[in-house]
Amino acid sequence: MSDEADTGSDENHSESDEIDKSDTERVAGDIHATYTEADGERRLRFERD
């Protein structure tokens, strides 16, 4: 196995997933997130109660 195959792309995805879950749990009570996809663009909008 070469180091080139493991340059961190998998690590980045794992870290990103963990951060997203953590943030979602932390703010779920106060902020609502709305995800929309239109014209090939993805948007995430946050609103407070």
Image: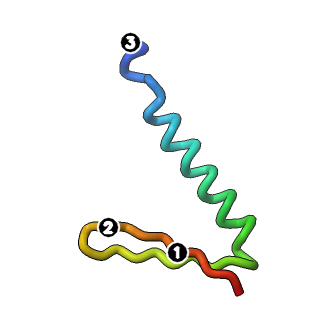
Secondary structure state at the residue bearing disc 3: loop
Density class for disc 1 (Cα within 10 Å; few <14, some 14-19, many ≥20) is few
Q: Earlier in the sequence, mark 2 or mark 3?
A: 3
Residue 21 found in image quarter = bottom right
Circle 2 sits on which residue? 41
Circle 1 sits on which residue? 45
Q: In the image, residue 7 lies at what x, y percent?
A: 44, 23
Relative placement, left or right, of 28 versus 5 is right
Residue 28 found in image quarter = bottom right
Q: Give above or below for 36 relative to 6.
A: below
For the residues bearing labels 2 and 1, Cβ distance under 8 angstroms:
no
Type of amino acid under label 1: Arg
Compute the Cα span from label 2 to label 3. Answer: 36 Å
Circle 3 sits on which residue? 2
Q: In the image, residue 44 lies at what x, y percent?
A: 48, 70
Compute the Cα span from label 2 to label 1. Answer: 13 Å
For the residues bearing labels 2 and 3, Cβ distance under 8 angstroms:
no
Quadrant containing the C terminus is bottom right
Residue positioned most to the bottom: 49
Secondary structure state at the residue bearing disc 2: strand
